[in-house]
Amino acid sequence: MAYDKFNVLTSTVVPLPAENVDTDQIIPARFLKATEREGFGDNLFRDWRYDVEGNPKKDFVLNDSTYNGKILLAGKNFGSGSSREHAVWALYDYGFRCVVSSFFADIFKNNCLNIGVLPVTISPEFAEVLFEAVESDPKTEIEVDIDKQTITLLSSGQSESFDINAYKKQNMKNGFDDIDYLLNIKSDITEFAKSR
Amino acid sequence: MEKKTLFDKIWDAHVVKSVPAGPDVFFIDKHFIHEVTSPVAFLNLEKRGVSVLYPERTVATPDHNVPTVDQDKTIKDKLSRMQVEKLRENCKKYDIELHDLGTDHHGIVHVIGPELGITQPGMTIVCGDSHTSTHGAFGAIAFGIGTSEVEMVLATQCIMQSKPKKMRITVDGELGQGVTSKDIILYIISKITAAGATGYFVEYAGSAFRNLSMEARMTVCNMSIEMGARGGLIAPDQTTFDYLKGKRYAPKGEAWDRAVAEWTALQTDEGAVFEKEYNFDAADIEPMITYGTNPGMGIKIKDLIPTDEGLEGSNKKSFLKSLDYMGFAPGEAIKGKVVDYVFVGSCTNGRIEDIRAVANFVKGKKKADNITAWIVPGSREVEKLASEEGLVQILEEAGFQLRQPGCSACLAMNDDKIPSGKYAVSTSNRNFEGRQGPGARTLLASPLTVAAVAVTGKITDPREV
């Protein structure tokens, strides 16, 4: 469904340097039982965020009030495992509009782009720079400009460009999704289907 | 003429059109849905005022959250019940084939698709589940999608996809005794890591795969996603055709002959280029087990758990965090570790050959006292065969609890949860933190290894029992 347009996002950052964060960590399977897309943010990183009694775990970054923002800075191979789009719904619902990592799992990245969370892939070196900057000063801001395809550490001006295909870029900028496009070419599809 | 891989041939035949500087409009032949990742897709269709374009191309079954006991009764868990009822409602409304709880072909979506002959060579198949890669065993392009894409397929039978890169993994040679297809795939993932095939689609080639049964090939393709690949496929051959012949939805009569002729052509051309190639020797593969919290963290059962030597920074941190979760120390032996549960089931290893392997092994033996042993058939058909072949009796005499079909403890959405801190040796596909229940510790292995563990109560090489 349509989502908010994405142009330039300037925000503080939540750092999560753990590697191989799979979608079962982002949202455990037992919280996938909804029939509507509502309230998933409450269970984002559920088992890292809360103990079995439901008390917040003090050492987890989402429970640390020094860090907040619309950008999640994640470790490498983020979003591996299950194809559950609920993982991205949970991130979006919690307030994240952008995830930055040196390496994303494939299906997760697709799911992000389909619902308006921008996945930004950066070099491992730049990831290290960003982690250091954010951890030494939680007020550090990052600017993500989709039009220029750049991500910039505002305190130092260090910047890197990132890839996104022109089609997805237009979608993100306009808040369009793929179905809008597909429904527009339905006659091409039904013609093609005759041969299958 | 341009040399094409098997993957290229199927992909190119399904591109409706290519978006300039963007993805392909990719046509989907068959779409499987289940109760967990479809309700929001249907809801959004309604909001848009759009219907299902080709309902005959979608097949549904409830599998992820269903209880594995008392399936003839109303589902107790309210949210699970609502999801299953929603699926029924949607299937009825849009005239979609549903294999409901208690019917002859109910089961895990990736078990019933092949069983019914829906899965066929040369097809494109998707489902809102990452283990859709299973169907690649038939020489099909099959992969998992998100709910937005489920909605796209329902509305337009297409998704927008950029063509992945191609990887070929060749394993030649004979497998040793006690070494199974699960060991092959755990071995491969341990070599190329849990992210080693991200961005690729894999073709499995070589005599080790040619010699596998269809069910064993499904186990391999199923876990393609566990090394990051979107999917993996194996070229169809006589084994594929023999499996499919006579299945409910397989072509019949002259149509069958035509289909086989077409399917036979689905091979990678000599000289076609893969962006990445790996070669392994089947003789190097031995019974495998995982010790950590991603499927790439696997070793031969006889080997020691690796140490953190040579690891730095976040790599080291992640490795030690993983071992800490598992309660293991770097450099110690995994063999002989006492465990609490065994689980036989899932879309990876819940088929009749898996049940047979376990039953043959435990015949006349008893499970160890410290073990709770669950066996969950992948489908009603598997359950029926297991009963007819006398396997159910053997397993029950050995102390296994036989449950009804579903995804069960593979992802623990229902009550089949491993308690916190307990160890489970499992035939499933993921050893992520909490995957089999909050705090549960999972070790992935083959059905044969799981059978050996059930009998001895500790991590055991099945060749040594």
Image (tube, coloured by chain):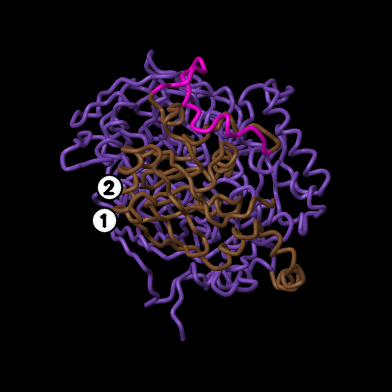
Chain colours: A brown, B purple
Q: Amino acid at mark 2?
A: Ile
Classify residue B449 by image quadrant.
top left
* CA neighbours of label 2 inside 10 A, class few (<14), some (14 to 19), many (20+): many
Q: Classify mark 1: helix, strand or loop.
A: strand
Residue situated furthest front in the rendering: A155
Q: Callout 2: residue from which chain?
A: B
Disc assigned to residue B383: none
Judge if badges 1 and 2 mark residues of a common chain. Answer: yes
Q: Is residue B459 left or right of residue B199?
A: left
Q: Is residue B444 left or right of residue B377?
A: left
Can residue B366 be seen in the rendering of this structure? no
Predominant SS of the magenta segment: loop
**Up-down: is A27 above or below B200?**
above
Disc assigned to residue B281: 1
Closer to the camera, B368 or B317? B317
Q: Which residues are magenta?
A: A37-58
Q: Callout 1: residue from which chain?
A: B
Is the C terminus of chain B in the top left, top right, bottom left or bottom right quadrant?
top left
Q: Classify mark 2: helix, strand or loop.
A: loop
Closer to the camera, B43 or B202? B43
Q: Position of residue A35 (x, y in %)?
A: 70, 36
Q: Position of residue A42 (x, y in %)?
A: 58, 29
The residue that label 2 is drawn on is B285
Q: Residue at x 74, y 39 (%)?
A: B87
**Up-down: is B89 above or below A153?**
above
